Amino acid sequence: MLNENIKAIRKSKGLSQEELAIKLNVVRQTISKWEHGLSVPDSDMLISISEALETPVSTLLGKTVVESKVDDLKVISEKLEIINLQLAQKKTGKRKILHWLFLSLCALIVTISVVLIVLNSSYLGWNYDDPETAVVGVAFHAFEWMFVRLAPIIFVGAIAGIFLTGKKA
């Protein structure tokens, strides 16, 4: 009973025989002998074992401990793996959305640039004396002025974003 309990509790704590032996300042073969029932630890060593395994001595000496924690760990491990896969899928989905947004932004900037080039900066020849067209002319001039200064910066940022959000190998 003691030998089975030492082995079951050691395994449930995720310790190897070597690791437990280091904690107890004994050789690994001593742990192996205890677990195979070839020898029994003395009372002082039993207290040390209970401290190292963070288990009461009564549990070590009591009824046989079932290794149910190993199964519990497998279930928890499987659930964590599923959660990690879901998080990875969400991250991939967000990256794809960002990638397409950056591509769309580049296309929009190119389209607006082409339109402005085709219009040949008509605001320079706009008649600002007519009050009805003066407002439109000022608004168009302000838009073009901002666009010409900010578009290159935004375009370079969008190109960088496209490369950063592209598929990873």
Image (cartoon, rainbow, N blue to C red):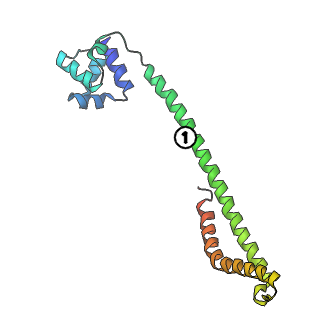
Q: Residues within 10 Å of mark 1 (few under 14, many from 20)?
A: few
Query: Which of the 4 image quarters holds residue 131?
Result: bottom right
Q: Is residue 152 left or right of residue 26?
A: right
Up the image or down, 48 lies above or below 77; here it is above
Give whichever of 33, 63 is nearer the camera.
63
Query: Which of the 4 image quarters holds residue 102?
Result: bottom right
Where in the figure is residue 6, as x and y percent of width and height?
31, 19
Q: Secondary structure at mark 1?
A: helix
| Residue found 20% across the figure and 20% down from its top | 45
Q: Is residue 8 left or right of residue 78?
A: left
| Residue found 76% across the figure and 85% down from its top | 123
Q: Quadrant of the C terminus?
A: bottom right
Pointer 1 residue: 84
Q: Is residue 42 visible?
A: no
Up the image or down, 39 lies above or below 167; here it is above
Give whichever of 18, 42 is nearer the camera.
42
Q: Is residue 43 visible?
A: yes
Disc 1 residue type? Asn
| Residue found 27% across the figure and 19% down from its top | 33
Query: Which of the 4 image quarters holds residue 67?
Result: top left
Where in the figure is residue 111, as x and y percent of width and height?
76, 73
Where in the figure is residue 31, as x and y percent of width and height?
27, 23
Q: Is residue 8 left or right of residue 129?
A: left
Across the whole image, how many numbered discs are drawn on residues? 1
Q: Is residue 67 left or right of residue 120?
A: left
